[in-house]
Amino acid sequence: MKIFPCVIGLGYVGLPIFLRLQKKFKTVGFDNNHDRILELNKRIDRNKEFKKNELYFKNNSIVSYSLEEIKNCNFYIVAVPTPIYKNNKPNISVLKLVSENLSSILKKNDIVFYESTVYPGITDFLAKNILSKRSKFKLGIDFYVGYSPERINPGDKIHTIEKISKIVSLDCNRKDIINKVYKVYNLLTKKIVFTKKIKEAETAKVIENTQRDLNIALMNEILVFCEKLKLDFHLVKKLASTKWNFLNFKPGLSPI
């Protein structure tokens, strides 16, 4: 069976994935934001990550906000946001909604990959309690679910998706399914780190974000006390960075 991918969520993460996949496969990009779809069809990226000449669609690929357009796809990549509530608890309502919609069109041997930032266990929860329960299909027998944490850094033109290592996790022993996964993700990057441990992959993403946020927070504090002591923050950072193991993070409090 031919691979017919669908990328759900065409933001900072989903759009680069869609653009790379449609170079080889007929691909559907789905987003429930009607304005976003209209803009992309006019080759306009409101996030200004891609220019008009980079937004050509190949292999009869399309972008759409209609579920009807994605029902015949067989490899779904979910790249929707996972914000937090005011009480700092994760909001996975969009992930749940997407999974509910997918469960209504899921077919035998379909593959679903989640790319969204989640806490350990969410992929398993969505697969068993929504996709499997609602579709009546058996996970790991009738359909397959994996997790590949996104590592897109908006605005970064150096560490683009094709140049970075990408974790791909799938608990499956079927060679044909694993081969399909490799065929899809090899179009995104040749640096695939494969594992069967989905929860460990989810946890790795949490650690990546935590480490980054802690270091940015530290630089924020250094910036604040430099300003209070009337010190040249740029010079302080420049001098500190001469040490071989200095982590060159920028503060998030100002555009430095």
Image (cartoon, rainbow, N blue to C red):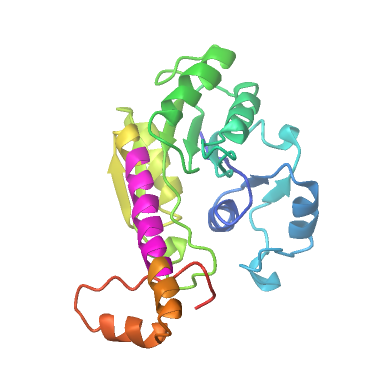
Quarter assignment of residue 169 = top left
Q: Residue at x 49, y 78 (%)?
A: 256
Within the magenta stretch, is there residue 209? yes
Q: Nearer the viewer, residue 207 or 188?
A: 207
| Residue 35 shows in this picture | yes
Number of marks in the rendered image: 0
Q: Position of residue 187 (x, y in %)?
A: 45, 55
From the image, give the main secondary structure of the stretch colored magenta: helix
Drawn side of residue 32 relative to residue 160, left or right? right
Q: Residue at x 53, y 58 (%)?
A: 20
Q: Position of residue 253 (x, y in %)?
A: 51, 68
Q: Residue at x 41, y 57 (%)?
A: 213
Q: Nearer the viewer, residue 145 or 218?
A: 218
Q: Nearer the viewer, residue 219 or 91?
A: 219
Q: Is residue 237 above or below residue 252?
A: below
| Residue 190 shows in this picture | no
Q: Residue at x 48, y 37 (%)?
A: 113
Q: Position of residue 128 (x, y in %)?
A: 47, 18
Q: Is residue 41 above or below residue 178?
A: below
Tell me the magenta residue range.
202-220
Quarter assignment of residue 53 = bottom right
Quarter assignment of residue 83 = top right
Drawn side of residue 181 relative to residue 247, left or right? right
Q: Nearer the viewer, residue 88 or 227?
A: 227
Q: Position of residue 119 (x, y in %)?
A: 42, 36
Q: Is residue 64 above or below residue 48?
A: above
Furthest-left residue in this view: 244
Within the magenta stretch, is there residue 9? no
